[in-house]
Image (tube, rainbow, N blue to C red):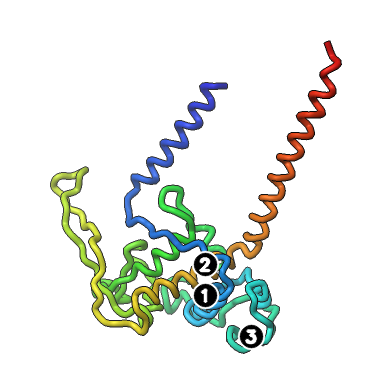
Amino acid sequence: MKKLILSFLAAIGFASAAVAAGGGAQWDRFPTEKLTDLPSLQTGAKLFVNHCLNCHAAAFMRYNRMRDIGLSEADIKKYLMFATDKVGDTMTIAMSPREAKAWFGGVPPDLTLVARSRADLAKGSGADYLYSYLRGYYRDDTKATGWNNTIFPDVGMPNVLWQMQGQRGAKFAEQKDPHDPQATTHVFEGFEQLTPGTMSPAEFDNAVADLVAFMTWMAEPNRAFRLQLGVWVLLYLAVLLVLVWRLNASYWKEVK
């Protein structure tokens, strides 16, 4: 049994090391305090509807669920609903899969659960991924869209937030490949601002954090309740453990 446990732990460590050795740009840490900030979630909902919901659906989320982040049905209808008239409908788009494939070469993925599906053991949570990805765009004239991304190289989606962020270039340095002395690799060194956006860099980072907070909430609206319930369950089990331990001692004290 001891050997089995040691083998299991060694396998986990090997898998973690393999993931960490996979390379790629490291993810920035998403400011998790945004997840419980209702104004941030509401701003993120507005950004999502205006910038993401044109091509990407969120077909497992209903508009009226946004009442949980402090929005009234009147607010939802007035500011966030463009593809339907019913507040109980799901967040779908007018574009059909056939049209999407003809225009983009593929169907843009549904974003309802993207914040949960993009977690990486070595790099961070799905929120970290989205926060880094949306801030990782730079101009690249060799690509069909004119854009590339440090987190998702050769990305097919253009930078839909470029007017807010402005246009940036990326600086890379050539280094020798440690695994092949004859080859070189390009190492990302930083961004350079080419044209200004409507927001300052700090304002843009804050807006992206709001958007990611909403997408993270959308992936699991009951997350806050689940965490709160988990704390109470653990406290209950701790009290129950004490009671069972004392009952067990009382039961066996007369047994010789």
SS at mark 2 in the image = helix
Q: Residues within 10 Å of mark 3 (few under 14, many from 20)?
A: few
Reading the image, the residue beneath label 2 is 34
Q: Residues within 10 Å of mark 2 (few under 14, many from 20)?
A: some
Q: Residue furthest top?
A: 256
- The quadrant in which residue 248 appears is top right
Q: x and y percent of residue 242 in the render?
A: 74, 34
Reading the image, the residue beneath label 3 is 75
Q: Give the CA distance from mark 3 to mark 1.
A: 14 Å
Type of amino acid at the residue the image marks with label 3: Asp
Q: x and y percent of residue 91 in the render?
A: 61, 76
Determine whether, in the image, residue 226 is placed left or right of residue 57: right
Q: Residue at x 21, y 66 (%)?
A: 171
SS at mark 1 in the image = helix
SS at mark 3 in the image = helix
Q: Give the CA distance from mark 2 to mark 1.
A: 10 Å
| Mark closest to the chain's N terminus, 3 or 1 | 1
Above or below — where is 21 with respect to 164?
above
Q: Give the CA distance from mark 3 to mark 2.
A: 21 Å
Determine whether, in the image, residue 98 is placed left or right of residue 224: left
Q: Are marks 2 and 1 in contact (CB under 8 Å)?
A: yes
| Mark closest to the chain's N terminus, 2 or 1 | 2
Pick whichever, 246 or 52, lies toward us.
246
If the image is split into quadrants, where does the N terminus sit?
top right
Q: x and y percent of residue 97 in the render?
A: 53, 75
Reading the image, the residue beneath label 1 is 44
| Mark closest to the chain's N terminus, 3 or 2 | 2
